[in-house]
Image (cartoon, grey):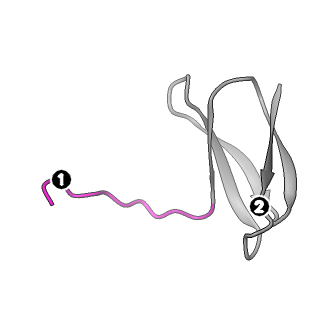
Amino acid sequence: MSSIRMDLSGMPDAQPAVAVDCKKAYEEIELGTLNPENQTINLPRTSDWAIAVGIFENTRVKPGR
């Protein structure tokens, strides 16, 4: 197990979060709802992680601007 410390105290309110292990095939791991505070997030293994906090819309960038 691995953990990461994050300071989310600047967020206006609680937000959903997901993690992605960058060394494996793409798969989002739900982290639940994170509160606006300093916290430690426990991840299932040691790796290179990308963590997204917030609500994101599915958008695509059109090629050839």
Front residue of this view, candidates 28 and 2:
2
Query: Per the image, is 58 magenta?
Result: yes
Of the residues under marks 1 and 2, which one precedes in the sequence?
2
Q: Which mark is residue 63?
A: 1
Q: Which mark is residue 2?
A: none
Above/below status of 47 relative to 63: above
Q: Residues within 10 Å of mark 2 (few under 14, many from 20)?
A: some
Question: In the figure, is residue 10 to the left or right of 54?
Answer: right
Q: Amino acid at mark 2?
A: Leu
- Mark 1 against mark 2, which lies toward the viewer? 2
Q: Position of residue 59 (x, y in %)?
A: 37, 61
What's drawn in magenta, residue-wise? Answer: 54-65
Above/below status of 42 relative to 35: above
Question: In the figure, is residue 59 to the left or right of 41?
Answer: left
Q: Main secondary structure of the magenta part?
A: loop
Q: Position of residue 44 (x, y in %)?
A: 77, 28
- The residue under the point 52% across, 62% down is 56
- The residue under the point 63% across, 29% down is 48
- The residue under the point 50% across, 26% down is 25
